[in-house]
Amino acid sequence: QNLEEAVAAGRFRADLFHRLTQFRLVVPPLRDRVEDIVPLAEYFLEAVHEGLEITDDAKRTLESYPWPGNVRELRNVINMCAVTARGHFVRTLDLPERLQDHYAALSEQESDLKRLFQSVNSEMDGPDATTPGAMLQDMEKRLILQVLGHTGGHQERAANLLGISRRTLSRKLKRYDAEGKDSPLERESGVEVV
């Protein structure tokens, strides 16, 4: 809660607020401190089960997760892994399913992007390469279609992943439709746009 607003609204004592704010310590969320995730995980693991190590793949999985519960969630996950891990290592399979699913989805997106960049690179010497902006427009179109394919044609989720508004995405899709007879998404990927 915003304590300043609570004080102004009379829901929090002003004298207590001033005592609490003599020294402010701003700690960014764990998702903004990716470099701290593995050292914290190793520290928590050492505290509950000396001798266990985290595999490199499990470290990447931990680093990829957004940690909505911050450090407390990380500590709880590590404590659970210390109990359930077999052998001397915490592997990706020892992590909770939500972390595994998140990492798997990222891996798919990364491979989709790699394929996209490979296809664009292979066409750099094509006939449209000399047209100003043609490669960038083609890459944007392919990326949009790739993300729509990934979301099963769900435009709002695709727009969120792309970091654009749903309206902008809709406008771009209409422009693509004007270039051809049917929806480019349906034509190229067989996914129905919703």
Image: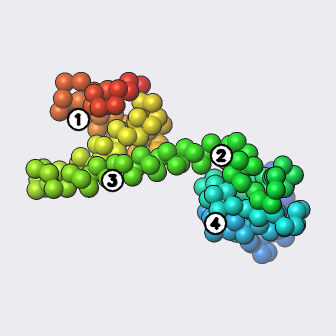
In screen coordinates, is 96 left or right of 65?
right
Q: Which amino acid does label 2 sit on?
A: Gln
Dot placed on the residue nearer the N-terminal end, 4 or 1 = 4
User: Element under label 4?
Assistant: loop
The one nearer the camera, 14 or 99, is 99
Residue at which label 2 appears: 100
Say which of 87 and 174 sits in front. Answer: 87
Furthest residue in direction bottom, as rendered: 23
Mark in the foreground, 3 or 4: 3
Can residue 118 be seen from the camera position used here?
Answer: yes
Q: Which residue carries the number 1 mark?
A: 175
Proximity of marks 4 and 2: CB atoms separated by less than 8 Å: no
Q: What secondary structure is found at the residue carrying circle 2?
A: helix
At x 61% / y 45%, what residue is drawn? 102
Residue type indicated by callout 4: Arg
Nearest to N terminus: mark 3 or mark 4:
4
Q: Which mark is nearer the camera, 2 or 1?
A: 2
